[in-house]
Image: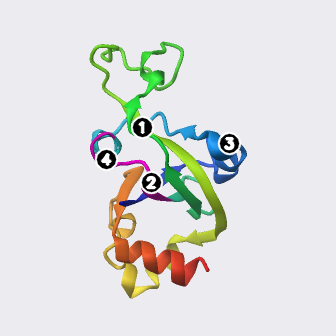
Amino acid sequence: MRYWLMKSEPDEFSIDDLARARRRGSAWFGVRNYQARNFMRDQMQIGDQVLFYHSSCPEPGIAGLAEVCTKAYPDETQFDPKSKYYDAKATRDDPRWANVDLWFVKKTRLLGLAELRRHKALAGMRLLARGNRLSITPVDADEWKFITTKLLT
């Protein structure tokens, strides 16, 4: 099992939106960064655990926990000319973009960047690296354990 941090703008899709979907699962669509796509397509597996992060909002931070519930499959929005995620170069025979589905696990207190930065155990976390803007990043098993057992309990 692997661990991930996945960012979403809460006005687009929040932890509360994922909670409303419950065990139906929600597609994590619209990723248009190759490295983030590759994480989903090549490394994510069913059962992987996710830190659900609210970004581009007044109070960014970890807002809950989720679980990957499907293997990667083609993101349908790439084929829809009406979608803001449309990609004219993508075809059904050769899709360029993928997504996975997530299940809601639980909502947590908001764990912001300032608090995450205060802990030495998280100094190497990719989220905290200068210039990191990826919407999906791997989380080290020790970082996951520290966050979920020390900060979110």
- Looking at the rendered image, the disc whose residue lies closer to the viewer, 4 or 3, is 3
The residue identified by callout 1 is: 31
Q: Earlier in the sequence, mark 4 or mark 3?
A: 3
User: Label 4 neighbourhood size at 10 Å, few (<14), some (14-19), many (20+)?
Assistant: some
Q: 46 or 40, which is in the foreground?
A: 46
The residue identified by callout 3 is: 21
User: Label 1 neighbourhood size at 10 Å, few (<14), some (14-19), many (20+)?
Assistant: many
User: Tags 1 and 2 in contact by the CB under 8 Å rule?
Assistant: no
State the residue at coordinates (53%, 46%). Answer: 102
User: Label 3 neighbourhood size at 10 Å, few (<14), some (14-19), many (20+)?
Assistant: some
Q: Does the magenta stretch include residue 43?
A: yes
The residue identified by callout 2 is: 47
Q: Does the magenta stretch include residue 49?
A: yes
Q: From what the image shows, is residue 133 above or below residue 34?
A: below
The region drawn magenta spans 41-50
Residue 68, horizontal then vertical, whole percent = 47, 49
Q: In which quarter of the image is the C terminus?
A: bottom right
The residue identified by callout 4 is: 39
Residue 54 in sight: no
